[in-house]
Image (cartoon, helix red, strand yellow):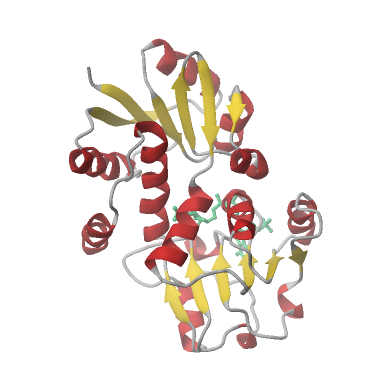
Amino acid sequence: MTDKYCVIGNPIAQSRSPQIHAVFAAQTGQDISYERCLAPVDDFAGTIGRLVAEGYKGANVTVPFKIEAAQIATRLSERGRAAGAVNTLAFRDGEIYADNTDGAGLIADIVRNAGVPLAGKRVLMLGAGGAARGAVLPILTEGPRELVIANRTRATAEALAAQFEGRVAVCDFADIDAPFDVIINATSASLAAAVPPLPPLAFCPDTLAFDMMYAKDPTVFMEFAAAHGAKVRDGLGMLVEQAAEAFALWRGVRPGTEQLLKELRSKL
Ligand SMILES: NC(=O)c1ccc[n+]([C@@H]2O[C@H](COP(=O)([O-])OP(=O)(O)OC[C@H]3O[C@@H](n4cnc5c(N)ncnc54)[C@H](OP(=O)(O)O)[C@@H]3O)[C@@H](O)[C@H]2O)c1
């Protein structure tokens, strides 16, 4: 029997997840269906109840439900707990297991796809919202020399760093006075064609400047970073890798991502 999955959000029409999971299923020979599910903003829990009753095996979760999804889980992964937000649910044996695969997707794309290890590196993360929260534990697990968070609202960055007991530092954009090896833009500033006010000396020719956002053309952050000599990368690979991680969690088989990433890139 075909196992049913979906992605839940509001809005949801923009989601590329059905296309991605259809490719993974064909590639691995898994018999699954995967559709979009528009949940009312005030009834995420009711939507989950309906999906479970209808026999769904799992779901991805996107804006604005990632925090609520962590709260309704009956069991949370360590990285889901660290993030306080999840993007993947598995409905098994009467329980709702919840995980956050966004950070793992980020790491897979930077370390494996881009070939930039984080071990021993100075890493700067811009932003302290949902995407940043999901990234901190997976970045720390890679063993960077330093992880610094800079956020427009400093108090939000401090609250996030405080969860990690001295392993994460916080600074203001203006305080940055030396280049970082990797700079991850986890703000939504690029959506508004804005660049966080980073001093140019944050970048050097060896810096990888990674924007979690992706579009047909380089984002304004990528253009800014490239103009100051950095190598740049957008978030399309992260999107595909977080989906592969969710697929592996559900199906116990890890799909390849290289070809799909090329196809998605060519269709942006
Ligand atoms: N590629 C992927 O798979 C993937 C996955 C998840 C998210 N994302 C992307 O990651 C980005 C962040 O998403 P999110 O869910 O974390 O959003 P969010 O929870 O709304 O957080 C937004 C963050 O951006 C900061 N910010 C917003 N506008 C800014 C500006 N003009 N200048 C400086 N900082 C600004 C906010 O700072 P304050 O605290 O001061 O408000 C906050 O830290 C989005 O572009 C999203 O598309 C990509």
Residue 261, image x and y in percent? 28, 58
Residue nearer the viewer, 107 or 52: 107
Vertical order, 211 against 25 (above or below): below
Q: Is residue 65 left or right of residue 263?
A: right
Q: Is residue 94 visible?
A: yes
Quarter containing the C terminus: bottom left
Residue 125, image x and y in percent? 62, 66
Image quadrant where residue 21 sits: top left
Vertical order, 17 against 215 (above or below): above
| Mark count | 0
Residue 153, image x and y in percent? 74, 60
Q: Is residue 159 left or right of residue 10?
A: right
Residue, x 32% and y 39% (percent of image)?
Answer: 253
Vertical order, 150 against 238 (above or below): below
Quarter containing the N terminus: top left
Residue 213, image x and y in percent? 45, 61
Residue, x 49% and y 45% (percent of image)?
Answer: 101
Residue, x 63% and y 50% (percent of image)?
Answer: 133
Q: Quadrant of ligand 1?
A: bottom right
Q: Is residue 6 left or right of residue 208?
A: left
Residue nearer the viewer, 18 or 145: 145
Vertical order, 78 against 187 (above or below): above
Residue, x 37% and y 59% (percent of image)?
Answer: 237
Q: Is residue 43 visible?
A: no
Q: Is residue 248 left or right of residue 172?
A: left
